[in-house]
Amino acid sequence: MEYFIKASAVLCIFYVCYKWFLEKETFFNANRCFLLSGLVMASLLPFMVIPVYVEYMPIVFSENVLMAETSSQDTSNLFNISTIITWLYVMGLAFFSGKLIVEFTSLFSLIRTHKQKKENGFTFIETTNNTAPFSFFKWIVFNPNQFREEELSHIISHEKVHAKEYHSIDVLLAQISCVVFWFNPICWLYKKEIQQNQEFIADFKAQKQSQCKKSYQRLLLKASITNHPLVVTNNFYNSLIKKRIVMLHKSKSNRSNTWKIGIVLPLLALFLMSFNTKKVFVNATQNHTLNTLDYTTKPTQEVVVITKDFTDSDLEEIKNQLSKKGLILKFKGVKRNTSGEIIAIKIDVKSNNSSSAKYNLNGEKAIAPIQISFEKNGDHIAIGNASSNSKEHKMVFLSKDGKITEIDTEKGS
């Protein structure tokens, strides 16, 4: 879920920058690179994490470890909001994936069932169907009966530009992004901008090859009819004919305006620093980096401490570290307040030697540091509040032989 939110935010940054600063400029090829970069960055940047180093002073904990069962309520729910959202997303993904597969099936069926003519690296396919001319990589499909010879020449020139520039790759990337991020309306608008910019490129280059520029523009007006193109192809017809004609008459943009392309960079940096950072704790006395707060209270005992500020990725990292030590650690029912602090958590630890311990905490305030201690051989595991001066709890150990040992902390024995 976090990945999709971050990826959508990056795509939104690129879309807004394009609409505000670049849409009316004639840097068509530069705009193409900008828009494609947006798709790539939206896919990759959420995985990038910037470490933020935080110094801490080691805390001395008592050797007694408390087993604090403050609530027996199971906070896990199979039909919670997260599960519903996941199923809705999977259903949407399946629907739009199926729709894309149908489009491809229709496209290749049309190509396979009609006469083909290869010329200068292009494959021309003549059809009798009432369909708009389009190209897909080196395939160019058209109905010759719909146009006069001069008009057909303009259309072929236009579609050749799409083929030479490999615009089909842009369309495929945009369409796949729409399938993956089908819930995000910005993604669909972004795809439209990519296709529109491709038309500007093809119009500009095709008109330069034309002996009569006015006839090419008249053809664009004629092309402004209702049609139903395939979504994975580059079509000569579209609903943006007026914009295409305006851009053909527009003077070239001043090169000094190319600074607008870089306006997205500080916004991306701000995004990374705001949402893609991770705290890395640095021991101020030993001057070395630790991913978790772990201390050794005895030569044969190891301790890991969990605080209220731990993120989901921090908890996952602890699971991975303890897994290397032969412990299976599970976190359930994690709840957070509006500040992102943990207020509820259920911990279950089990070793390969069958020693185990459980901890369940549920409240409205942020949790106090939780200490997980274990013998290096896995014989004893204990979980409890790291500040173990309370007289209301008992230290509880559950060893591999199933024997429970309780020590009354009030008596100190």
Image (spheres, rainbow, N blue to C red):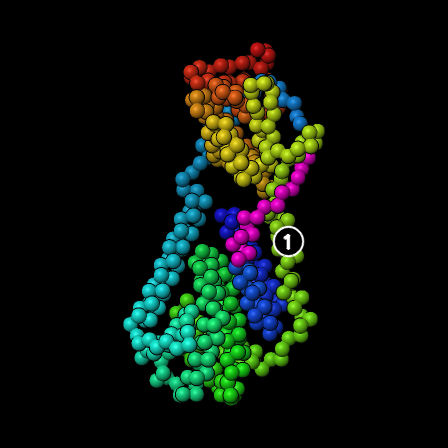
Residue 26: in magenta span: no
Q: In the drawing, does residue 302 fall left or right of residue 287?
A: left
Residue 44: in magenta span: yes
Extreme residue in the left direction = 113
Identify the residue position indicated by label 1 in the image.
Answer: 269
- Secondary structure at badge 1 equals helix
Extreme residue in the right direction = 285
Residue 159 in the image: state x and y as whole percent: 45, 76
Extreme residue in the front direction = 120
Residue 20 in the image: state x and y as whole percent: 62, 67
- Under mark 1, the amino acid is Ala
Asked whether the viewer can see residue 100, the reply is: yes
Task: Tell me where residue 235 sits by quadrant.
Answer: bottom left
Q: In the drawing, does residue 183 fall left or right of residue 128?
A: right
Residue 94, compared with residue 25, is above or below; it is above
In front: 226, or 204? 204
Residue 3, compared with residue 397, is above or below; it is below
On-image quarter of the C terminus:
top right
Residue 247 in the image: state x and y as whole percent: 57, 78
**Point 57% across, 27% down: residue:** 304
**Point 45% across, 24% down: residue:** 351
**Point 49% across, 14% down: residue:** 405
**Point 45% across, 56% down: residue:** 180
Residue 6 in the image: state x and y as whole percent: 54, 51
Residue interval drawn in magenta: 40-55
Residue 342, compared with residue 183, is above or below; it is above
